[in-house]
Image (cartoon, rainbow, N blue to C red):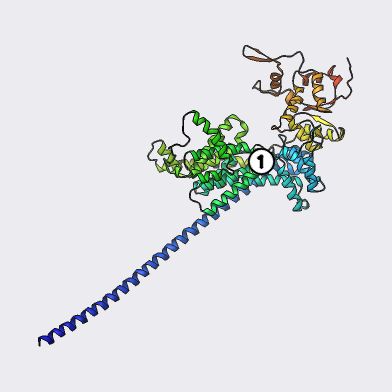
């Protein structure tokens, strides 16, 4: 009986164990299935969340790009409308249109016309490389001397696209410049957008650029100038550099930024003869980034777009630091706040400071500095990280949110106040008309010999070259020492020099006609000593200092005044052939007649 009971008990135990094992196995399978379901559900949610974030980001990028392009196109349309209403461009004759190209910029348009008038592009290009019809007594390579690559490209595109069938050459040229200005403001938009993370900053940058247009561009009155062609490429280069210096970009984006920097830098160097000075300043900014270890050295050297910029910066700064006993590498870092994590922002701080210093020294540099001040200010307004960094630097731990809200409202209110003024400029513009210059050019075209050589101020000579094609003694090119010397010799007509001295200077340049401008001869200025005639008196030693005052003195009267008296010896050397309120034209006598 005991053996039977034991066997029954053992049988029951085995059955219980098997049942428990089966239940446990089933339970484990159920748990695994549930865990798997939960895992799959979580993965699906993660994928949906990631897809949602990617979609949101793409939508933001799409609308941001759309806003950037729209701002650029609207600005180009605004410039075109403003230009047409200011100069009544569409209603003027060809001569009156060409006179609107001020500050000597008409000279560049002359070569554009020359390229279109040539039998072929190759023939026109060859004639520009051996130009002996512009500067009297000289053969120059006008392409290299004047950086005429924009005119070459514009004329080539105009020819190959067949644009002559539906658009006038001048409108094609003007449209190309306005198109580049659209690229300019679009690049500023992108810069502010990349740094702040919101395209609202880009719109603010463009708005402030337009509001301060008189300090941001010279396209209003001197459209063909080299900087109007070159600065849009520099702006694109800065935008690409801003993206390249960012920490959170992919390798593909980094390569795209690098290629953009290379192409725009090359074009910038090609178009503007002063571009290397600008790139040198940019190289110093990158050198400081490298010195403070704010960006990997690989990026700095690559971003230099030709490591010669960094090497120049090192050669300039290192001797000074050695002389002061300071090592180049320091332990100081600018990451005291959130903004220190963005090297592209620190670059723009250096960029703004350097160009701001140059703008204080040279007035013309404001056109390089002000656009980036507008862009950087727009970034600062729309970037909380910048404000938090500033507050941390000044030991201010917190700021009430209403203060920031009030600041934003104030800034947008300012924009709304200026918008009506900008729009009013399109409806209330005084007509630009220069009848005296039109009369002068008309006389040259009809009365002066085809081979005549004219002397005068460089800006006026550029207009004469454009409108009449006559040879001139100098050009508005201030990087050429020989042309500067010729200009100084011509300007002696406003100095206290004898008729014989001026005659010798003009005949040495093979001058046939000299033009005296009333605006220079009778120039009035509160800043005594800065007028052209004052500078000539100082250069010629015709200045007397008495008790802190400057007086001009010479045994000869001022030439531009004395020659109008029409008496000997001036009439022996010069004969007046044309005059109006603004200009007096004198023929340089080939045979001297002594009359008393």
Is 213 on the left or on the right of 121, as rendered? left
Quarter of the figure with the N terminus: bottom left
Q: Can you name the residue that lies furthest to the top here?
A: 547
* Residue 146: image location, x then y, percent: 72, 38
Residue drawn at 67 percent across, 42 percent down: 270
Q: In the rendered image, which quarter is residue 181 located in?
A: top right
Residue 366 in view:
yes
Q: In the rendered image, which quarter is residue 364 located in?
A: top right
Is 520 on the left or on the right of 236, as rendered? right
- Indicate whether 577 appears above or below 557: below
- Of residues 328 and 142, the one drawn nearer to the viewer in this rendering: 328
Residue drawn at 75 percent across, 29 percent down: 457
Is 199 on the left or on the right of 40, as rendered? right
Is 480 on the left or on the right of 192, as rendered? right
* Residue 431: image location, x then y, percent: 72, 37
Quarter of the figure with the C terminus: top right
Secondary structure beneath dot 1 equals helix
Q: Which residue is mark 1?
A: 228
Q: In the rendered image, which quarter is residue 577 located in?
A: top right
* Residue 378: image location, x then y, percent: 52, 42
Q: Crowding near pointer 1: few (<14 within 10 Å), some, many (20+)?
A: many
Residue 219 in view:
no
* Residue 397: image location, x then y, percent: 37, 39
- Of residues 365 and 405, the one drawn nearer to the viewer in this rendering: 365
- Numbered disc total: 1
């Amino acid at each position: 009986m005991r053996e039977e009971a034991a066997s029954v008990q053992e049988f029951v135990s085995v059955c219980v164990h098997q049942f428990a094992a089966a239940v446990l196995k089933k339970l484990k399978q159920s748990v695994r299935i549930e865990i798997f379901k939960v895992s799959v559900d979580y993965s699906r949610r993660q994928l949906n969340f990631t897809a949602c974030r990617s979609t949101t980001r793409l939508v933001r990028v799409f609308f941001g790009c759309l806003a950037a392009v729209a701002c650029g196109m609207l600005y180009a349309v605004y410039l075109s409308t403003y230009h047409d209403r200011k100069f009544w461009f569409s209603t003027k004759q060809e001569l009156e249109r060409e006179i609107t190209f001020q500050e000597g910029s008409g000279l560049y348009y002359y070569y554009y016309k020359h390229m279109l008038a040539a039998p072929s592009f190759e023939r026109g290009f060859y004639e520009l490389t051996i130009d002996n019809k512009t500067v009297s007594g000289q053969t120059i390579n006008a392409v290299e001397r004047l950086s005429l690559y924009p005119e070459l490209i514009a004329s080539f595109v105009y020819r190959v696209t067949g644009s002559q069938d539906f658009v006038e050459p001048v409108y094609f040229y003007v449209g190309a410049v306005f198109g580049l200005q659209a690229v300019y403001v679009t690049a500023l938009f992108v810069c502010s957008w990349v740094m702040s993370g919101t395209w609202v900053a880009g719109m603010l940058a463009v708005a402030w650029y337009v509001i301060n247009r008189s300090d941001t561009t010279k396209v209003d009155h001197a459209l063909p100038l080299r900087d109007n062609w070159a600065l849009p490429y520099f702006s694109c280069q800065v935008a690409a550099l801003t993206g390249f210096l960012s920490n959170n970009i992919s390798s593909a984006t980094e390569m795209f930024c690098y290629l953009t920097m290379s192409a725009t830098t090359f074009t910038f160097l090609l178009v503007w003869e002063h571009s290397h000075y600008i790139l040198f300043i940019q190289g110093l900014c990158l050198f400081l980034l490298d010195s403070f270890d704010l960006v990997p050295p690989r990026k700095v050297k690559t971003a230099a777009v030709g490591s010669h910029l960094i090497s120049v910066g090192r050669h300039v700064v290192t001797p000074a630091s050695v002389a002061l006993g300071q090592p180049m590498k320091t332990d100081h870092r600018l990451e005291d706040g959130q903004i220190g994590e963005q090297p592209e922002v620190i670059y723009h701080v250096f960029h703004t400071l350097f160009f701001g210093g140059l703008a204080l020294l040279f007035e013309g540099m404001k056109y390089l500095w002000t656009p980036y001040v507008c862009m950087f200010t727009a970034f600062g307004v729309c970037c909380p990280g910048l404000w938090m960094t500033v507050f941390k630097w000044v030991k201010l731990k917190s700021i009430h949110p209403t203060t920031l809200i009030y600041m934003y409202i104030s800034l947008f209110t300012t924009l709304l106040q200026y918008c009506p003024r900008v729009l009013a400029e399109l409806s209330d513009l005084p007509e630009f008309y220069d009848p005296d210059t039109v009369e002068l050019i008309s006389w040259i075209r009809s009365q002066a010999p085809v081979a005549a050589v004219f002397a005068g101020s460089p800006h006026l000579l550029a207009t004469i070259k454009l409108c009449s094609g006559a040879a001139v003694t100098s050009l508005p090119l201030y990087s050429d020492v020989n042309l500067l010397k010729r200009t100084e010799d011509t300007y002696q007509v406003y100095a206290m020099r004898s008729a014989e001295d001026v005659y010798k200077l003009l005949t040495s340049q093979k001058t046939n006609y000299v033009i005296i401008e009333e605006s220079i001869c009778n120039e009035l200025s509160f800043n005594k000593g800065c007028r052209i005639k004052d500078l000539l008196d100082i250069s010629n030693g015709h200045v007397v200092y008495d008790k802190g005052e400057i007086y001009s003195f010479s045994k000869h009267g001022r030439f531009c005044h004395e020659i109008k008296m029409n008496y000997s010896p001036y009439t022996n050397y010069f004969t007046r052939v044309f005059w109006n309120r603004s200009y007096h034209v004198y023929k340089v006598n080939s045979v001297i007649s002594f009359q008393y």
